Amino acid sequence: MNTTVKKLTAAVLTTAMLLTFCSCEKKDDNLAEELLNTGNDFIEAVASEDIREAKDLVSGNSPFNEVDPDSMNHLIYQVISKASLDEPGNVRFNDDKTIATVRFKLTSLEYYTVRYELSDEYYYYMTEEDYLTIFNNENNLSTSNITLRFEKDGDSWLLKSDSAIRLLEKITKGWDYGIYTINITEEEAKGYCLDVLNDIAIGNLRTELYCIDDVNDLLPDLGIPDSGTNPDVYEAKSEYVSAYVNYILNHDYEITRAYYYDYNMLFTGEAPSQDAIYDFLKNDFMVDFYAEWIKARYSGLSESEACNNILIAFYTRLAEEIKYMDPEPYENQFYFYFSEDGNFESMDLTNVINPYNGGTFYDAEHSLTPEETAELNRAAALKLYTNGDITLSEYNDYIASLEEEPQSEEVPAVEGEYPNQAVNTREYVPDFSDGSLVYADSQADANHYWMFYSKENGVLDTVEYYIDDTGIYVTCIFEEPFDKGTILIADWWQEGVAISENETITIAEDGTTRVTVHLPTRLFPADSYEFRLWDDTHNHVYAYVQLNKG
């Protein structure tokens, strides 16, 4: 039996007072009516939380201690108040006529009947008013039969203890564990959701509500190093998130219950599309992107400072331009949490903005032809000179550098082949390997880079690398040749951040054993890179290569 009902019945069924015996014979019809009244008086006493009166109507000694009725869910008493007995049947006695047994029709709020009449989304997490509306609807009452026993006590008949327990169990069955109230309505919950979004729209980023540590967790990796700690970058990102939410609130939206079995609100509407964001990055922002690199070149900024300036400029401009972008569907859940007494405690969001799966700066650069890249760099240099960010001499120097052909005695004559800058590469079998896995490392080169790679015996022969102003070239030399049309996949990581993934390489000629992959590194090569070359399923790694500086 549920604890609530145990306590309730315990309170009701504690020792009944014995009344003075008075010899009085009654006809069976009159007795049936008396027993009916006793049963209904008992129900009414319990419903009104009059435990003393209820005890006086019950015979037998209860083994339970008295409990405070205030500790019960008071809606249980409302359920009991809707119950009543009617239509008593024939009274049957034991041999000495001290025990009377009679069958009644019981009208009550039968839990499962009511439950099945309600839609799932309405039933779960209802307010007290919702429950009272259900209880007061006579259409929700059901009838059933119940047989009760009464014990003669003087000139009165009292409800037997076991029958009293059974009667209460039948009335409250289901309700004793099926009642859980909350103290905010669905409309109030929707209001909470809008309050949070409006807070974000004005810059109040309450990260404790978003299941995140800070705003960095809301935004994607754009393929550019980002420490996540620069305060100016953080502020620019926050401005973007606020502008994003403003976009949502300025378009059509709807807030509904997410699921029937919890109290989550589903916010659906429109958000700036990922295609539009990438289009801005690729077609509108690339001049600014190159401008920051050029400015850093002549101002002596470090790579991390240059990257921070790019991120600040990007998110600041994106926040300004986002209101003009085409929409895509937006969906977000607000999770509500309540205390045991149903009071609203807190709320979380799955995500404030749609996860971004669009292109990165790396993707944008690689989509450009050399002519387009040069044109964007010229425009970037002109913008800097016009704004006074670089001098005329610096402008002319940079424009001239775009026209220069790379001059180096190391530049190979054969297209696609590059000299090996790895110094004294040494292969060895790690202690845990049976020989099938081989490691290799090299000494530092003239630029202070050294290489590490791992390979499977019988697949990869060796690895070479070459670094110049245009980037990094990693060449994997295989023991067995590839056929024309073979697909390989390359991934690059810089300083622990993925900057290029799923780059497809198609073998151009039968018999190919040298596969060279190029990573443009711009003006400031980083201190560490990781490279993986996979098969076409992206499941098996042919080569894992690290380049580290220092």
Image (cartoon, rainbow, N blue to C red):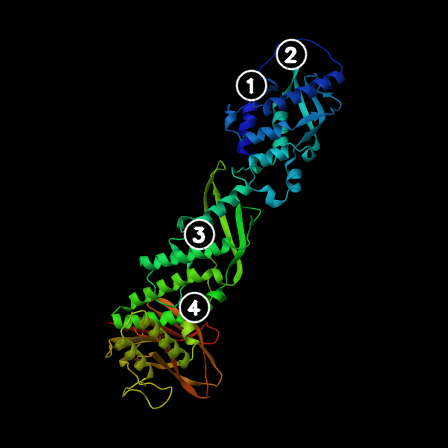
Amino acid type for the residue under numbered disc 4: Leu
Q: Which mark is residue 201?
A: 3
Amino acid type for the residue under numbered disc 2: Gly
Secondary structure of the residue carrying tag 1 is helix
**Residue wearing tag 4:** 281
Q: Residues within 10 Å of mark 2 (few under 14, many from 20)?
A: some
Amino acid type for the residue under numbered disc 3: Ala
Image x and y of residue 491, in percent: 40, 73
Q: CA distance from mark 3 to mark 2?
A: 76 Å
Q: CA distance from mark 3 to mark 1?
A: 59 Å
Camera sees residue 221 = yes
Q: Looking at the image, which is closer to me, 537 or 449?
A: 449
Q: Nearer the viewer, mark 1 or mark 2?
A: 1
**Residue wearing tag 2:** 154
Left-right relation of 69 to 283: right
Q: Residues within 10 Å of mark 1 (few under 14, many from 20)?
A: some
Image x and y of residue 239, in percent: 40, 56
